[in-house]
Amino acid sequence: MANTLDYKQIKELTYLAIQYKNLEAILGLLKTNVYASTDALDCDEGVKFFTEKAKNSETSMAEVYFFIRRPISEKYKKIFRRLARQSILKTSLKITSKGIRGNYKKTVPYYHIGMPEFDLDETIQHNPLNIYKKKLNL
């Protein structure tokens, strides 16, 4: 079906997708014809739509920027680049602190092997290779 759509139809469908706030449809239309979709996104409404979606959705704006970086005007290219940058930073912060990998491990500097009140089973479960170091991660 996507191959039968011409430039004008894809542009109109992209306007409708912006109006109904359908991100998946816009991504599909971008994959079908980048130039027609970008022509529809090259306006204030398109920028407002993606600014809202960048805050709320988990979809990477870097993928959107990858599609539209060449055909979009210089005026909106900077805005979409900023949205892509924010999306990448948000994802990287989730990976490094809390989120995809979970909570970071806390190092207890005052514990040394042989001190009383130590749970050996918990240490072996969480840190089996570093058991003979002076400091253990909990």
Image (tube, rainbow, N blue to C red):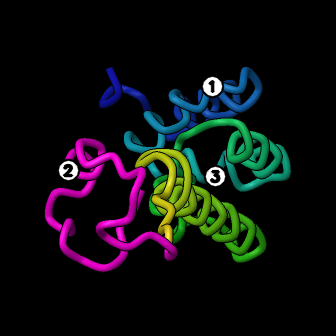
How far is the residue under mark 3 from the one under mark 1? Answer: 17 Å
Q: Nearer the viewer, residue 9 or 74?
A: 74
Secondary-structure class at tag 2 = helix
Provide residue 59's location: percent of width, then percent of height.
53, 42
Check disc 2 and give the amino acid type: Ile
Q: Nearer the viewer, residue 6 or 52?
A: 52
Helix, strand or loop: magenta stretch: loop
Instruction: Please report whichever mark, 1 or 2, sits nearer to the chain's N-terminal start.
Output: 1
Looking at the rendered image, the disc whose residue lies closer to the viewer, 1 or 2, is 2
Q: Which residue is mark 1?
A: 22
Residue 57 left/right relative to 79: left
Q: Which residue occupies the extreme front position in the image?
A: 116
Secondary-structure class at tag 3 = helix
Q: Are marks 3 and 2 in contact (CB under 8 Å)?
A: no
Residue 35 left/right relative to 80: left
Q: Which residue is mark 3?
A: 39
Looking at the rendered image, the disc whose residue lies closer to the viewer, 3 or 2, is 2
- Asked if residue 65 can be seen in this view, the reply is no
Question: Is residue 39 found inside the magenta-colored segment of the image?
Answer: no
Q: Quadrant of the N terminus?
A: top left
Q: Which residue is mark 2?
A: 124
Check disc 1 and give the amino acid type: Asn
Provide residue 138's location: percent of width, then percent of height.
42, 56
Residue name at image x 20 percent, y 66 percent: 131
Check disc 3 and give the amino acid type: Asp
Span shown in magenta: 109-138
Question: Is residue 125 found inside the magenta-colored segment of the image?
Answer: yes
